[in-house]
Image (spheres, grey):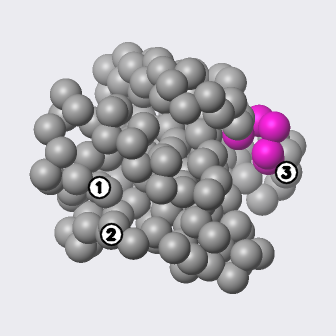
Amino acid sequence: MSILIIALPRTGSSALGEKLAVDNKLIYEFEPFNPKSGLPYIDAYKNRVIKTMVFHTPFFIKEDNRLNWLITISEDFEKVILLSRKDLVLCTESWSFLLHNSKKGFKSNLPYLWEKTPNFDEQLEFIKKCDTELRYISQKINIPITFYEDLYDLNDSNRLRKGNRENSTKGKLL
């Protein structure tokens, strides 16, 4: 079996990929098409769950051919999951917070209190572009988009976002 997850950032794609790999006894591959990861390119998909972001492009694919490349490789998988969020503002809040605070050592799997970051407006445009691209892929491969809000309990106390910094009297979280 082979599963491809094409996602927007901060949509629970890593947790979903890990769970699918465990449940189906497959190997989980975290973002192997991300040119910044330094991982070797993977072209053998059998017995794997491959998770990638819609904006990741291997070094040998030109940016203007990225979407066509994703559409083409999706044919090599038995199952394809397109993952986004219904609320792109919340998606952007999480993404911009991660990008801004990763310079300070913040990791994507740590709990945090959200606050607006200087990169928010720029990243909102980026997330909207990614969403448009994912919708295009969905149309081309005739697979519906799955949404974070339909997979995860937004009221779960295990969520990483513990609220907004200005509304919280809790201890020091980043």
Within the magenta stretch, is there residue 150?
A: yes
User: Where does residue 110 sit, x and y in percent of width and height?
Assistant: 56, 62
- Which residue carries the number 2 mark? 42
Amino acid type of the residue that numbered disc 2 sits on in the rendered structure: Ile
Query: Element type at marker 3?
Result: loop
* Circle nearer the viewer, 3 or 1: 1
Residue at 32% x, 20% y is 122
Q: Position of residue 60 (x, y in %)?
A: 13, 51
For the residue marked with disc 3, what is the amino acid? Asp
Q: Residue at x 68, y 24 (%)?
A: 86
Cα separation between marks 3 and 1? 30 Å
Which residue is disc 1 drawn over?
34
Is residue 22 shown in magenta? no
Of callouts 3 and 1, the N-terminal one:
1
Crowding at label 2, few (<14), some or many (≥20) Cα neighbours within 10 Å? few
Labels 2 and 1: the sequence-earlier one: 1
- Name the spot of residue 129 as percent of width and height, x first: 39, 20
Q: Which mark is residue 94?
A: none
Amino acid type indicated by mark 1: Asn
Q: Is residue 135 above or below residue 20?
A: above
Secondary structure beneath label 1:
loop
* Label 1: how many Cα within 10 Å (few below 14, some 14–19, many 20+): some
Residue 43, quarter of picture = bottom left
Residue 156 - label: 3
Residues shaded magenta:
148-152
- Residue 172 in sight: no
**Precedes in sequence: disc 3 or disc 2:** 2
Point 39% across, 42% down: residue: 72
